[in-house]
Image (tube, rainbow, N blue to C red):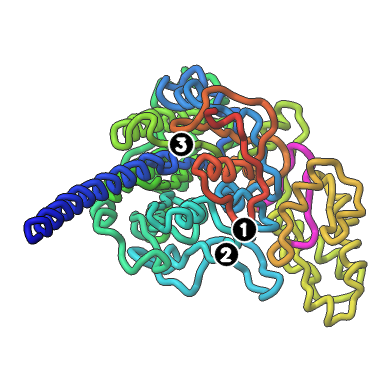
């Protein structure tokens, strides 16, 4: 009997050992299968926004681009040829917000680069946050955050989808070009401080700069300030530009004429710091280098969850404003940018792996031709000065209503902000004041429409202008009267040289959109897509929720089937 009991006990021990082995084996297989069934995603997403890049720059300089830059994206990736901005005004802040939220100023709240808050009466900058402190830089440069952005970004949604395991960073010369794309949950956003020549951040992201950025700033300091901007190739090879010495461009401070070679020595360092660097192609070089350093030091694309790097290039915009789209400067700027883009793609191939990252390249807006240049080409064009227009308009209103107060508080962003408190105190009929404004503005040279946004449903306006005006109107942050310029005309305090942007016209709102890498089909489409479609397409590719204010649609042909 006792022997039988020992036998049974031995059998039970044998069974338990094998049962535990089987359990561990099955558990490991199950865990392995679970990992194998993880959501397929790229290791890294890189979003590139080239500030003030007109769509036609893809082809204007095509024959001089390298095979590894823009041409590589176009030939190996997917090209959305007819991508349009669908709101007004077409400025930098709203553009970056739109790309990453899939929304429009009416919803995401970035109504312009700066605006008059109709609730508080305060003038605000789109990335301004007086409740944070500068980190690594000056007070002027550092008190910034995405506080004014009312909707989530696709980068926010990636953080939410992965329980914050994904890392998100933004880098740019302009603070708004870094902050708005990176969103509310970013691990870091870095931008350029003119007073120090360093890249900085704010306490919104942390209490100190990462050590790698301190080292980058130390090594980078002054490197790109001393060289003159000389041409990459002989001057006579720049066939897509007007003559170098012309009346359409503005010189740098201290220059006799806006001709090569250019120097920033005329920018008073004691007063403006390193501001002049923003206008040089070396500003783009700095940002490319910073993007590489961020990828390397933060080990982006090296974990099981996708990371996201938002990169915005601002020097193209600064140079564009000063020299205009027909200048030798812009041709040289983009030829240089193409070479550096090719090297950046090679870097991504080495560091993340070819086919392991997804990249898109777009612009926040385009730019108009210089009005004087267009007039010389016998094409209707012109410009108006905001300050002068506001003074004349207020004078007209004072005479019309027999008052001494200024009834227009601000004329900016192609919009009129009323002096609401003054109108109420004087007991004027607000509807009559608005009608007087739209009537006077409608008779001004270069103005096609002056729209009372509170009455836009009753007005005869062509599409897509009506929809763009509605999409851009934020009741709390926009002026109540929207100006629509005639083609070729623009408004601002810009002056006679260079150019600007902000209108509904294709030269301002037709932007490039190139997709490349993991999950991206090869090809192109000429059907109209919108800037608002970028974020939902990224969300679909990453299999995450669309941003909270999204109104865009997925561009299905972009993705591999």
Does the magenta run of residues contain 344?
no
Report the side of 23 relative to 508 (left or right): left
Q: Secondary structure at mark 3?
A: strand
> Which residues fall within the magenta stretch?
479-492
Residue situated furthest front in the rendering: 1
Residue at the location (15% across, 50% down)? 14
**Disc 3 or 2, which lies upstream in sequence?**
2
**Nearer-N-terminus badge (3/1):** 1
Q: Is residue 491 magenta?
A: yes
Q: Which residue is mark 3?
A: 359
Q: Is residue 291 visible?
A: no
Structural distance between the alpha carbons of marks 3 and 2: 27 Å
CB under 8 Å between discs 3 and 1: no
Q: Which mark is residue 148?
A: 2
On residue 310, the disc is: none
Q: Is residue 389 left or right of residue 220?
A: right
Spatial CA span between label 3 and label 1: 25 Å
Check disc 2 and report its element: helix, strand or loop: loop
The residue indicated by pointer 1 is 110
Determine whether the residue tagged by mark 1 lies in a helix, strand or loop: loop
- Regarding residue 271, the answer to whether it shows in the image is yes
Q: Is residue 378 left or right of residue 329?
A: right
Distance of label 2 from label 1 (alpha carbons): 7 Å
Question: Which residue is painted at 38% across and 47% down in the image?
Answer: 305
Kindly identify the residue that appears in the image at 45 percent across and 66 percent down.
140
Q: Camera-side residue: 476 or 278?
A: 476
């Amino acid at each position: 009997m006792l022997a039988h009991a020992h036998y049974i006990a031995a059998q039970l021990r044998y069974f338990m050992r094998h049962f535990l082995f089987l359990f561990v084996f099955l558990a490991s297989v199950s865990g392995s299968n679970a990992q194998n069934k993880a959501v397929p995603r790229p290791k890294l997403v890189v979003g590139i926004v080239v500030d003030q890049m007109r769509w036609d720059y893809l082809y204007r300089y095509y024959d001089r681009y390298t095979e590894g830059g823009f041409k590589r994206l176009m030939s190996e990736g997917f090209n959305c040829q007819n991508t349009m901005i669908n709101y007004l005004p077409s400025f930098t802040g709203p553009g970056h917000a739109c790309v990453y939220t899939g929304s429009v100023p009416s919803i995401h709240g970035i109504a312009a680069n700066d605006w008059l808050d109709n609730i508080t009466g305060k003038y605000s900058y789109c990335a301004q946050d007086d409740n944070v402190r500068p980190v690594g830089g000056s007070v002027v440069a550092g008190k910034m955050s995405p506080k004014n952005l009312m909707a989530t970004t696709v980068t926010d949604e990636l953080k939410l989808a992965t329980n914050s395991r994904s890392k998100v960073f933004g880098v740019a010369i302009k603070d708004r070009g870094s902050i708005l794309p990176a969103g509310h949950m970013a691990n870091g956003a870095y931008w350029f401080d003119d007073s120090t020549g360093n890249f900085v951040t704010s306490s919104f992201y942390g209490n100190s700069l990462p050590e790698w950025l301190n080292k980058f700033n130390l090594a980078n300091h002054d490197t790109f300030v001393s060289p003159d901007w000389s041409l990459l190739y002989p001057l006579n090879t720049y066939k897509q530009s007007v003559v170098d010495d012309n009346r359409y461009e503005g010189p740098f401070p201290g220059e006799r004429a806006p001709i090569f070679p250019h120097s920033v020595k005329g920018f008073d360092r004691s007063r403006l710091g390193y501001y002049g660097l923003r206008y040089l192609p070396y500003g783009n070089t700095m940002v490319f280098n910073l993007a590489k350093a961020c990828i390397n030091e933060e080990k982006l694309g090296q974990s099981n969850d996708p990371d996201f790097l938002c990169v915005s290039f601002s020097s193209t915009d600064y140079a564009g404003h000063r020299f205009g789209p027909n200048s030798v400067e812009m041709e040289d700027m983009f030829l240089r940018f193409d070479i550096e883009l090719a090297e950046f793609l090679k870097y991504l191939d080495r560091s993340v792996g070819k086919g392991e990252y997804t990249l898109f390249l777009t612009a926040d807006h385009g730019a108009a031709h210089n009005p004087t240049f267009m007039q010389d080409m016998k094409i209707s064009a012109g410009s108006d000065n905001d300050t002068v227009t506001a003074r004349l308009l207020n004078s007209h209103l004072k005479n019309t209503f027999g008052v001494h107060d200024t009834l227009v508080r601000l004329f900016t962003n192609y919009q009129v902000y009323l002096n609401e408190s003054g109108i109420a105190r004087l007991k004027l009929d607000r509807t009559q004041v608005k009608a007087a404004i739209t009537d006077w503005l409608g008779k001004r040279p270069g103005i096609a429409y002056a729209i009372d946004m509170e009455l836009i449903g009753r007005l005869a306006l062509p599409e897509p202008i009506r929809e763009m005006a509605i999409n851009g109107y934020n009741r709390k942050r926009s002026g109540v009267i929207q100006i629509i310029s005639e083609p070729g005309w623009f408004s601002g305090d810009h002056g006679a040289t260079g150019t600007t942007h902000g209108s509904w016209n294709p030269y301002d709102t037709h932007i490039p959109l190139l997709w490349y890498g993991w999950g991206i089909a090869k090809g192109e489409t000429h059907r109209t897509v919108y800037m608002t479609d970028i974020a939902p397409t990224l969300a679909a590719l990453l299999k995450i929720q669309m941003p909270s204010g999204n109104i865009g649609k997925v561009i299905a042909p972009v993705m591999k089937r």
